[in-house]
Amino acid sequence: MTSPTGPAPDRRPRLTRGDLDALPSYVPGRSPADLARELGLPEAIKLASNEVPYGPLPGVVEAVAAAVAGAHRYPDMGVIALRDTLAERYGVSADRIATGCGSVALAEHLVRATCLPGDEVVYSWRSFEAYPIITATSGATSVRVRNDAGHGHDLAAMAAAVTDRTRLILVCNPNNPTGTSVRRAELDRFLAGVPDDVLVVLDEAYREFVTDAEVPDGLEAYGDRPNVVVLRTLSKAWGLAGLRIGFLVGPPEVAGTIRKIVTPFSTSLAAQAGALAALAQADEVHRRCALVVAERDRVTEALRKLLPAGVTVPASQANFVWLPLGDRAVPFGRACEARGVIVRPFAGEGVRVTIGTPAENDAFLAAAESAI
Ligand SMILES: *Cc1c(COP(=O)(O)O)cnc(C)c1O
């Protein structure tokens, strides 16, 4: 068949790289408004994207509204005020900080800054679904190391996977989506064995929810290492997911390179203003994180009683829990959705459930009980 308006689709010349076709797309949590409409409910509950449920921090909306009065001007490309504030808060110099349009963008820039086509990026799997995408866009090769039996990073196997093509290693701590974390002694040992020309990125998107004293704060423990970069985000504990703002702390040369290659002005005016206002609310962030942590522990315990024998919910240090349901993941997710609760199934592997308010968590537990 030929189309009257152009050549047949299969004759069209290829305009984008063929190797990207096989790449799985990032799956965003589905919209609660859509689900509520579909089910005829007043509202649905979204526990699928690891946001904190308590709204923007006090002062953020006002600060962003005031800033956007100047929206016809470009923002500060150097992000000076925000980098200075972060530097003070985290006790590092501002030349070691780069900001970006979410920490995912910074992770992608780090791959671009370290890898040529064919170079290797090592990471644990299952881990953050963005990693294969940001690796492939540079033409780099993903080297996935299977999670250990407890659903966490197998650091010894990751170290063994390093070759002379390895340029970057991603350590997701705590790990999304399994909630597991690596502890100080094993991370010390791992870092000591990594060649000094390989960059290790500690993705600490969930650091603020960590309560296990054995899980190291990457900035405190390894912040001054010459081949370590720590990624942090304001999307989770700091409540700014919609504004897209994250930052990295690393060696000055690495941070400087990232500031050079970042898409110009990608830390928007609203993101800079919102982040400054949020960072002034550290006490409130601590209070909210404590609520989330208490609920995380309650939900974990309830699930362990609820789930069939053989399904063990790993201890989570993040603001979500992982249900390793294997082939039952997708049907479980569908059953929760039918009861108005959106969770995040990973087909054939498990289901990630974000910790919400106590009422939301109760709704999830009720849905989980009838789903099982
Ligand atoms: C949510 C998340 C991020 C943060 O992404 P942003 O782009 O900053 O919103 C980074 N890493 C992991 C592992 C995450 O789960």
Image (cartoon, rainbow, N blue to C red):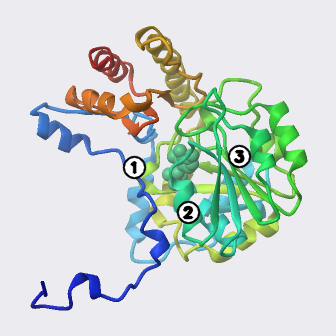
**Rendering coords of residue 330 (x, y %):** 33, 35
- Up-down relation of residue 255 to residue 43 (above or below): below
N-terminal-most mark, 1 or 3:
1
Q: Which mark is residue 352?
A: none
**Rendering coords of residue 9 (x, y %):** 24, 82
Q: Indicate the secondary structure of the residue bearing disc 2.
A: helix
Q: Indicate the secondary structure of the residue bearing disc 1.
A: helix
Q: CA distance from mark 1 to mark 3?
A: 22 Å
Q: Tell me the amino acid under the disc marked 3.
A: Arg
N-terminal-most mark, 3 or 2:
3
User: Can residue 100 be seen?
Assistant: no
Foreground of the two, 27 or 159: 159
Residue at (88%, 57%) from the top-left corner?
195
Residue at (55%, 75%) from the top-left corner?
263
Q: Indicate the secondary structure of the residue bearing disc 3.
A: helix
Q: Nearer the viewer, mark 1 or mark 2?
A: 2
**Rendering coords of residue 216 (x, y %):** 76, 34
Foreground of the two, 249 or 348: 348
Q: Which mark is residue 89?
A: 3
Residue 146 shown left or right of residue 285 in the figure: right
Residue 336 figure quarter: top left
Q: Find disc 1 in the rendering and name its residue.
A: 61
